[in-house]
Structure formats: structure tokens, C-alpha cells
Amino acid sequence: MKPVWIIDDDRSIRWVLEKSLARADIEFESFASADDALRALSHHQPQVVVSDIRMPGRSGLDFLQTLHQRHPLIPAIIMTAYSDLESAVSAFQGGAFEYLPKPFDINHAVDLIRRALEQSRRKSSDVGQLEVAADILGHATAMQDVFRAIGRLSQSHATVLINGESGTGKELVARALHRHSPRADKPFIAINTAAIPKDLLESELFGHERGAFTGAAATRHGRFEQAEGGTLFLDEIGDMPSELQTRLLRVLSDGNFYRVGGHQPIKANVRIITATHQNLEERVKLGLFREDLFHRLNVIRLRLPPLRERREDIPLLAKYFLQKSAVDLAVEQKQFSEATLHHLSAQDFPGNVRQLENLCHWLTVMTPSQMIEIADLPPEWRCVVEISAATDWSSALANQVETALQRGDEGIMESFVAQFERTLILQALHHTNGRRIEAATLLGIGRNTLTRKIQELGLEDREA
């Protein structure tokens, strides 16, 4: 296991934490400044970070922002004086695992670090310490299987077929396979075979000789030559025309190809990764895809699950995309309320990860407040999720409770009841355009009760 990083300019704080972690048999590494820790981050990673906020040079929050951009799964504990808490919450926007006010009880601090270590272990893949692209992160079992496969294939040149619905991140997985392969220092070339007209696709893949056809004024290298020594990613392979399927099969069989209009064979030193949202076995049965090519491509198959099969990853991805959008747009990062995250976790997301990313970008631009509530979502996302065997709200609630229990959260009943009441009241007020009497009637409670709940839950500024 990797060490716990202690970052604090106060030598006495570092000393106390070092002695306590040593007694607890927890490996650690100390830094006197965030700048020192940031330099170390370029070479290795911590399992957990414990950092002060205010230090000479770069602040602890600056370091933590960089940490979570590069490694969103690493838990971070912020040490802060009480006066810093409000600014820390505002600046870090929920990225920290926990806040540790100074002065702190050392036993409580060690317990907190143990909890953070446990969370870090749960979120880590079992395969080495493989760093996966942040936007394909996830701790759902199906995604962990994908991460393990990338790790097992890290020294392989094997052909890989990736199956998954549109928007599940097939190209991201292909890039990760390349990045962790022996070919990582060579080109990664991607082409969507369904997006290029049939008449141009052959030249696009294999290149052409000068004069091969009208308009071929010069010799052109195709994608196979561009990817020499590296990886060629063929997306939507199921839509490849039959004649090109034959040419691709020949390349996979003998490792040679010809440019369009060419007569000299060219040796192809390229790893092939393909992807499709279609059922290739079914297309083979229908005579739309060559069976021999299918078996050539289907050496290693990875299936990417749709978001509806990995709902526990939706909050993690949503927070990441919200952070990413804020960085891309150079604006202050917004934050999801727990009710909104629960609401999004119950959605089906037919466009999968890409659709979630687009939604987070929209919210970064369009939401007026820093806290994103259900009422801030676009109209099509505010609809109450229909109850079904697969996606009823009680199942979503059960998943959230289980996650909280595994984190070791306390006061779960009070927290979830408050979130439940908050969601009901906000939705009712939004439905009635802020008319409290009408909202109270629809909820089946008295107006005074509604007013009291609004005050207790701090909803005065959230009324529609």
C-alpha cells in the first residue's frame, strides 16, 4: 500500500502525526510545503493525503485541486482552523474526504486516516496501481473488471474488441489500453468507420498512390501507416462495408496491405483495437459481417456497462465532470446537493457517460447558484423517475444507504430523512411556483409545518 502524505509547514504537527502513524503501523511521508508535495506527485502517488490549508507558497487547497484533477480517487483530509472552514468548503467544493479542525485529538485523526485508507482501498483496482483516465473511473464491479483487464493486457499486443452502447467510453478504454501497452510511445490513431463515406474509407485506411483515381494528385499515407508501431482504433467496426472487411481480414492474416492503386505490399506493424455498439454475432448470422473476421477481432473482448447498470458511479462521475467543466470554462466550480445526486442516480441516461458529461457542462454554464438542486436541472431531467422493477426509487435509496454504511457514516437516518423532506418540499414548491399553501396541500401537511420545515432545512433561498 502507498504511504499517507502529511503536508504541513508546522514541524510540530508533522511530528505528532508521524509518531502516531508509526505506532499504528501506517506508512507515511511528510512534506513541509504543498510545492514539495506537488513535485513528488509527478513521480509517485499517496494512498491518502492529510494537508494543512494555509502554508507559505502554494496553499493546501491548490495542491488538493491538482491532486483531484489527476487522481480523483485519492481521499484528502484537510486540517484547518475553525475560521478557515467556511472558505475551505466554498473553495474546495466537497472534494475533501473530511475536515480536521485544529487543534485536533490525535486518536480521532488516526481513526479518520484509517477510514480514508479503507475508502481508498475499496476504490482502487485490484490490478497493481494502474492509473486509469479519470473520466472512465468507477467503483462498480463491472468497471473494476474493465480496469483489471486493462492491467492484464498492459504487456500484451493482443487484438481487443470493445462492446458498449453509445457514450459508454469505448474510445477512452482503447486509449487506456494503448497508454498502458508496450506501444505507448508510438501513435494512437482512431477512425470511426461509420462516419466516413464508403467510397473514401478504403483510401482513409490504406492510403493511395499518386494517380490512383481522379483527384489523387499525390501519394497519401493511410491510417495503417500513420499508426506504424502503435495502435489503430477502428470504432463502429460493425458498420464496415463487406469489401473492406475482406481487406482488413487480409491485413490481420498476413500482416501486409496495399495502398489503393499500389502494387508493392507494405508491412503493417499495428495493434488493432475495435469497438461497436452492435451485436456482431447477430450480424454474422444475418450475413452482414464476415465470420472469419469476427473471430480474428474477437481475441479479447471487453464489455462496457451502460450507466444504468453502474448507478453507484453516477455521483462520482457527475462530480468529476462538474469539476472538469469548471476548469475548462475557467469559472468557479459548482456543487451538487445530495438530493440532486440521488435524483440523477435514478436516471437511465440513454446517452450514458457522454450524456452525463454534457449535462454537467450545461449546469456549469446555466445554474445561477453554487449549489445545484433538482429544480436547477433542465426540464427533461426534473421529471419524477417512473417506478419500475429495475429503477424504483426505493432501490436507489437502498443503494445510497448501503454506500453510506460502507463509508462508516453516522447519523444516517437523520441525514436521509432530511434529504427526503428537502426533495419533496423543493419539488412541491417548484410545481406550485413557490405558493406555499398549495404546496402544503399537495404534500398533505399544514402551512405552518411547511414553513417550519423550510426554515429547518435552510430552503428559504431555494423556493421557486
Image (cartoon, rainbow, N blue to C red):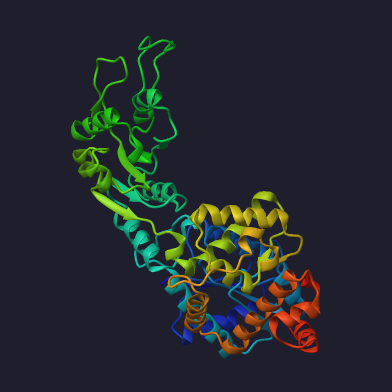
Give the side of residue 154 with respect to residue 331, left or right. left
Give the side of residue 264 with respect to residue 205, left or right. left
Q: Position of residue 257 (x, y in %)?
A: 26, 25
The quadrant of the picture occupied by the N terminus is: bottom left
The quadrant of the picture occupied by the C terminus is: bottom right
Q: Position of residue 293 (x, y in %)?
A: 22, 38
- Relative to 176, residue 251 above or below: above
Q: Position of residue 306 (x, y in %)?
A: 43, 59
Residue at 56% from the left image edge and 90% from the top image edge? 107
The mark total stands at 0
Residue at 19% from the left image edge and 34% from the top image edge? 253
Quadrant assignment, res 319: bottom right
Give the side of residue 279 with respect to residue 449, left or right. left
Quadrant assignment, res 150: bottom left
Residue 260 or 332: which is nearer the viewer?
A: 260
Residue at 43% from the left image edge and 30% from the top image edge? 196
- Relative to 265, residue 450 above or below: below
Residue at 59% from the left image edge and 69% from the top image edge? 384
From where the camera sits, is residue 449 visible? yes
Q: Position of residue 461 (x, y in %)?
A: 80, 73
From where the camera sits, is residue 157 visible? no
